[in-house]
């Protein structure tokens, strides 16, 4: 008589799904972390905005072009070897970013990140195809996709906290000569008068109260106040113009002297007394240190508070104190990826039959629902099969058009809130985050929806219908944005864009698993390549469409049209027709 362990399926497939989801979390965490830290990287390495844009964009080209070969390698050598290697390789590239000291090495490492990350989702699709029962493939695809969204959402927050943690208050906040980026900016808000005239007008040296009183006049902002306090600590025998006019040619001794002068005001406990700091976009630590407290601030805390305020007031003048934290953060992310890669390699097997903890009942549960002819798993891949598959072309174009419109949420939406509605920074951040979080729910429920519809309507319409309907819903939401009047209305409707987009994502993943057979990595890699080409082209094309007159309604209509076309193409996707030709299955 069979034992209970033989009758009751083991649950190894759930652990496999959890590990694959963790890989997806790291995929997006490592992809986005450098984008969040870019301003600190630029300051640290002295590179321009254009050069930093080159660093960030380099990732997407190798990521797009690496999809198909990475998928083929996963099909050929199995996910245990390849997905483990992909994760380890891109983690090494991410960790090495912490040792980069020039533009070229940054670009090379980001190209490496894109190349190795390209294999993650194609290999993950192969894992789902071999480890998940047919009726749970959509849900499993949605869960893995949610992992990617979680990693993307966590990247800015986690990176910020880690950078602060690596630069604690106990570390020095005082300025070194190399921390001075553009001293001219410190005085950009002062009237164009001689320094001696400014001193006479507001009653310094040594009279902060007089300075605050003068702020009711021409210098009625915090930047002017701080600039004058800086002047209070400079030598009194030179005119302002004479001091600043020579700035570009200052010697190291001059810079060191000016840094010492600035450090004097960083040490002032009463520097900010009675000053309204609401004009400044301050980090959380600065907000905490500027709040009234029962305990007096330590000298280290005073220096940190004052430096963060100066940095916020003059963002181009002083190197950010948190800039010292971006390198160890990259190293931590790289190390975390290597740890997960080792765990994945140790636990994972390429099929349930190879896993020592997977019992006969679980193997039967997984393999008993295979929908494709087993011969599809034996035929070697021919590139012409991909070119001749009408359904795969439709799937590829759906992904291209979907990503073309969806990228609006992460590129143009923040700018739209500022340009069209002048939304303040903090509120704008919450608005931009909302669609991403709403989209996570779409990933999860989209997986359940496509599995349910397959059970009710069969794989042909169970994959095609939710994908097509979700594209049409998104098109309607984009079109509705033309008529909205408030930023919160736009945020809610664009959250529907994210929800609808992600609602259909598990269906297109599951379609690739259904028709790919042994070649699911190559199939998903092929269509995912087109999706990323759409993402890369979107900012360029949308920038041309919006034009110099910033015509957002025109942009919304273009995005809506892209989703209408995607929905129409989705109707032609047929999950009952494998990529391997029928005559090869019969061979």
Image (spheres, rainbow, N blue to C red):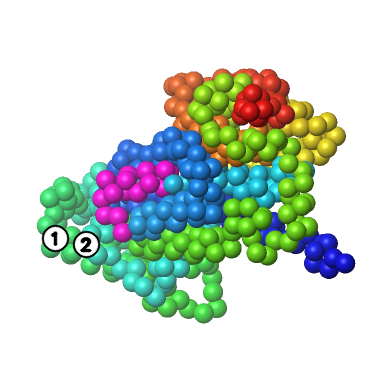
Residue stretch in magenta: 99-115
Q: Nearer the viewer, residue 307 or 123?
A: 123
Residue 307 visible in the picture = yes
Horizontal side, residue 152 vs residue 177: left or right? right
The percent position of residue 479, horizontal first and vertical second, equals 66, 23
Which residue is depicted at the point 23% across and 67% down?
260
The percent position of residue 439, horizontal first and vertical second, equals 66, 42
Horizontal side, residue 367 vs residue 58: left or right? right
Q: Which is more N-terminal, label 2 or label 1? A: 2
The quadrant where residue 463 appears: top right
Which residue is depicted at the point 50% across and 39% down?
72
Label 2: element kind: helix
* Magenta stretch holds residue 182: no
Horizontal side, residue 258 vs residue 309: left or right? left
Whole-angstrom CA distance, mark 1 to mark 2, is 7 Å
Horizontal side, residue 254 vs residue 83: left or right? left
Q: Is residue 541 above or below residue 224?
A: above
Tag 1 residue:
252
Label 1: element kind: helix
């Amino acid at each position: 008589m069979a034992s209970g362990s033989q009758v009751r399926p083991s649950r190894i497939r759930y652990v496999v799904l959890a590990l694959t989801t963790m890989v997806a979390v790291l995929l997006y965490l490592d992809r986005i972390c450098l984008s969040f830290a870019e301003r600190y990287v630029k300051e640290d390495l002295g590179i321009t905005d254009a050069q930093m844009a080159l660093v960030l964009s380099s990732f997407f080209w190798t990521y797009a072009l690496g999809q198909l070969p990475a998928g083929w390698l996963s099909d050929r050598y199995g996910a245990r070897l390849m997905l483990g290697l992909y994760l380890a390789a891109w983690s090494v590239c991410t960790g090495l970013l912490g040792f980069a000291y020039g533009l070229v090495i940054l670009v090379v490492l980001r190209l490496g990140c894109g190349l190795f990350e390209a294999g993650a989702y194609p290999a993950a699709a192969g894992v789902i195809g071999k480890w998940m029962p047919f009726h749970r493939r959509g849900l499993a695809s949605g869960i893995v996709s949610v992992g990617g969204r979680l990693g993307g959402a966590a990247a800015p927050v986690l990176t910020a906290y880690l950078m602060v943690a690596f630069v604690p208050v106990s570390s020095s906040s005082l300025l070194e000569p190399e921390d001075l980026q553009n001293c001219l900016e410190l005085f950009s808000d002062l009237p164009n008068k001689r320094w001696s005239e400014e001193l006479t007008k507001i009653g310094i040296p040594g009279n902060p109260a007089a300075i605050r009183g003068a702020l009711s006049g021409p210098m009625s902002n915090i930047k002017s106040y701080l600039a004058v306090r800086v002047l209070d600590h400079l030598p009194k025998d030179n005119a302002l113009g004479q001091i600043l006019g020579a700035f570009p040619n200052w010697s190291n001794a001059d810079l060191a002297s000016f840094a010492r002068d600035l450090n004097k005001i960083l040490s002032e406990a009463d520097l900010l007394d009675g000053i309204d700091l609401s004009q400044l976009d301050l980090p959380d630590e600065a907000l905490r240190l500027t709040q009234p407290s029962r305990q007096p601030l330590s000298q280290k805390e005073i220096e940190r508070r004052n430096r963060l305020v100066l940095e916020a007031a003059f963002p181009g003048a002083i190197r950010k104190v948190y800039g010292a934290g971006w390198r160890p953060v990259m190293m931590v992310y790289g190390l975390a990826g290597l740890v997960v890669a080792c765990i994945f390699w140790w636990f994972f097997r390429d099929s349930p039959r190879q896993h020592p903890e997977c019992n006969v009942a679980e193997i039967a549960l997984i393999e008993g629902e295979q929908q494709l002819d087993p011969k599809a798993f034996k035929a070697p891949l021919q590139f012409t099969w991909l070119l001749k598959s009408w359904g795969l072309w439709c799937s590829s174009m759906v992904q291209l058009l979907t990503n073309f419109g969806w990228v609006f949420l992460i590129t143009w939406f923040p700018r739209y809130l500022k340009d069209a509605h002048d939304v303040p920074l903090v509120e704008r951040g919450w608005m931009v985050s909302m669609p991403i979080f709403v989209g996570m729910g779409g990933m999860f429920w989209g997986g359940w929806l496509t599995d349910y519809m397959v059970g009710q309507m069969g794989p042909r319409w169970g994959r095609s219908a939710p994908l097509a309907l979700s594209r049409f819903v998104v098109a309607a939401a984009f079109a509705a944005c033309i008529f909205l009047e408030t930023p919160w209305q736009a945020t809610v409707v664009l959250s529907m864009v994210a929800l609808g987009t992600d609602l259909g994502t598990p269906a297109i993943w599951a379609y690739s698993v259904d028709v790919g057979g042994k070649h699911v990595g190559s199939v998903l890699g092929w269509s995912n390549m087109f999706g990323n080409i759409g993402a890369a082209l979107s900012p360029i094309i949308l920038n041309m469409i919006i034009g110099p007159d910033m015509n957002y309604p025109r942009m919304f209509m273009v995005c809506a049209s892209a989703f209408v076309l995607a929905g129409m193409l989705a109707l032609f996707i047929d999950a009952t027709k494998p990529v391997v030709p029928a005559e090869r299955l019969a061979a």
